Amino acid sequence: MNLVTGATGHIGNVLVRHLLARGQRVRAMLMPGEDPSPLDGLDIECVEADVLDFKSLQEAFRGIDVAYHLAGIITILPGSNQQVQAVNVLGTRNVIQAARLSGVRRLVYTSSIHALSRIPHGTIIDENVPFDAEHAISAYDHSKAQASLDVLQAVAEGLDAVIACPTGVIGPHDYRGSELGQLILDCVKNKPMFYVDGAYDFVDVRDVAH
């Protein structure tokens, strides 16, 4: 059985579909009272739990072989944010502990390119680039970097875990209208846009799930 936290999100619901297409069983973890419609029609088990409620998390992890941790808060706003810190850092620490106690075979954590150290322009980003919580630009960047470091510490202590660091995710099944997805739709609809110097990179959500 696979557990997917944040299963109704863009990457989450596409990952659920990918796992089902491979003939695997999926338990989707939703926040209490969360709208499950992105998962409508899928042959899955749904469970309500909160990464900040360890007891509910333990129940969600019961009987799980591989856990995919995608639940988190995304924000591009500068400055501190206690909720982002709590969900993304403390929530991940709870997930790590739940994974240990339940004896999962592997934990897959979805981090972000924003968790990585800023390196000189033109340098290739690969697994040698460290996570950097000290020089993070925003609360989100710091939270993902710190959570990633926590996962690496758990690996050093014996947990089998993998960290994925997507960039700007776009593609199908974007039911809630992600910021990048909405930006592209606004361009298509010729809505007024603000342009700035610079560039960005994108990745297909199906490639991230794969």
Image (tube, grey):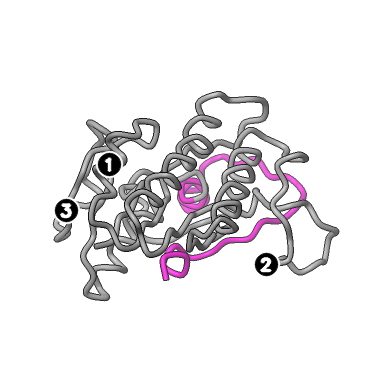
Marks 1 and 3 close (CB-CB < 8 Å): no
Residue 44, by quadrant, is bottom left
Q: CA distance from mark 3 to mark 2?
A: 34 Å
Find numbered disc 1 in the image and state the secondary structure of the residue it sits on.
strand
Report x, y in % for residue 113. Answer: 63, 54
Per the rendered image, the range of residues in magenta is 181-210
How would you rate the neighbour count of disc 1 (Cα within 10 Å): few for under 14, some for 14-19, many for 20 or more?
many
Which callout, 3 or 2, points at the residue further toward the start of the chain? 3
Is 189 inside the magenta-drawn segment? Answer: yes
Q: Amino acid at mark 2?
A: Glu
Q: Residue at x 22, y 43 (%)?
A: 36
Quarter assignment of residue 47: top left
The residue drawn where x is 25% and y is 73% is: 21
Q: Residues within 10 Å of mark 3 (few under 14, many from 20)?
A: few
On screen, residue 164 versus residue 174, left or right, reads right
Q: Earlier in the sequence, mark 2 or mark 1?
A: 1
**Alpha carbons under labels 1 and 3: distance apart:** 11 Å
Rendered location of residue 122, percent (x, y): 82, 66
Residue at 58% across, 46% down: 150
Q: How many marks?
A: 3
Question: Where residue 147 sits in the image (x, y, percent)?
Answer: 57, 44
What residue would you read off at disc 1?
30
Q: Secondary structure at mark 2?
A: loop
Do the residues bearing badges 2 and 1 touch, measured as CB atoms within 8 Å? Answer: no
Quarter that holds the C terminus: bottom left
Would you name the residue on which mark 2 appears? 127
Q: Which mark is residue 45?
A: 3
- Asked if residue 12 is positioned above or below residue 23 in the image, the reply reads above
What residue type is disc 3 on?
A: Glu
Q: Secondary structure at mark 3?
A: strand
